[in-house]
Amino acid sequence: MSAPSSSTPAPSVPVVVLSGPSGTGKTTVVSQLLVESPVTLMKSVSATTRPARVGEIDGQDYYFLSNDDFQTKRQAGEFLECAEVHKSGFWYGTLISEVQRAQDAGGWSLLEIDVEGALNVMQRYPAAVSIFLSSPPDVYERRLRDRGTEDEAVIQRRLQTAEQELTFADRYRYRVVNESLDDAVQEICQILESVEQNHQDRRS
Ligand code: 5GP
C-alpha cells in the first residue's frame, strides 16, 4: 500500500468515501445513488491493473492500466491512495485528478474503494464523509456467488477479506445496512443532505 502524498491539498468540496465487503450491493447502491442524490455526486473512476470484465468500459468503469503504467503514476505521486486489493495481485488506486475533476465541476467526489484505501483517504481528508455499507451476513455470500464473475478461490479470499473489513466499520462516520436497496439509498441521501446543510451553515 502506498501512503497518500502529504502535499495533496484538501478539496474545497466534500469527498464521499463508500466501502464495504464484496457482495454488499455497493455497485447497485452507487448507481441508484448517482441518480437520487440530493447533491451533485461525481463517481471517481479508479485506475486498476486488473483486466476488464466483459461489458466494462475503459475510462468509465475503471482506467485499465498495465502494471508498468500504474507504477509509473504511483511513483509520480498521481494517486491519492492506492493498494493491492484483496491480495489479488492487482492494484487499484484513486487518481488525484479524479477528485480535482469533480471539484472543477462543482460536484462532490464519490469514491467507491476498499477499506484500506478508505482509511488512507480519511487520514488525508479528516472531513471525508465516510460510509460503511454492509449487508445481513447470510445475504452477502449469496450476492457474491450470484454475480458469477469469480471462481471459488477468489470468492473464499473475498469472504475472508469481508470478515476482516467488518471489524473496521466503526472507523467510518456512518454505517448503513443494505437490507433493501431503496432504504439503503434513502439513508445515504439523508446523510448527504445533512452534510450539505452543515456545509452551507459553515459557509454562511
Ligand atoms: P472489483 O475488481 O470487483 O471491481 O473491485 C474490487 C475491490 O476494489 C472493491 O472492493 C473496490 O471497492 C476496490 N476498489 C475499486 N477502486 C479502488 C480504488 O481506487 N482504491 C482502492 N483502494 N480500492 C478500490
Image: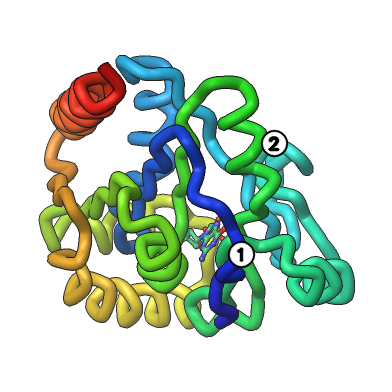
Q: As displayed, is residue 154 above or below residue 147?
A: below
Amino acid, disc 2: Gln
Q: As displayed, is residue 37 above or below residue 72?
A: above
Which residue in the structure is indicated by mark 1? 7
Compare residues 194 and 115 and report the one nearer the observer: 194
Amino acid, disc 1: Ser
- What crowding class fits label 2: few (fewer than 14 Cα within 10 Å), some (14-19), or many (20 or more)? few
Residue at the location (61% across, 70% down)? 5
Compare residues 43 and 98 and report the one nearer the observer: 98
Compare residues 9 and 49 and report the one nearer the observer: 9
Residue 170 lies, in percent from the top left, at 13, 66
Residue at the location (26% across, 16% down)? 204
Q: As displayed, is residue 94 above or below residue 198?
A: below
Residue at the location (61% across, 21% down)? 105
Residue 37 lies, in percent from the top left, at 34, 19
- What crowding class fits label 1: few (fewer than 14 Cα within 10 Å), some (14-19), or many (20 or more)? few
Q: Is residue 94 found left or right of 177 in the rendered image?
A: right
Q: Is residue 195 found left or right of 128 in the rendered image?
A: left
Gap in Å between the C-alphas at discs 1 and 2? 28 Å
Q: As displayed, is residue 157 above or below residue 30?
A: below
Which residue in the structure is indicated by mark 2? 60
Residue 9 lies, in percent from the top left, at 56, 53
Of circles 1 and 2, the one toward us is: 1
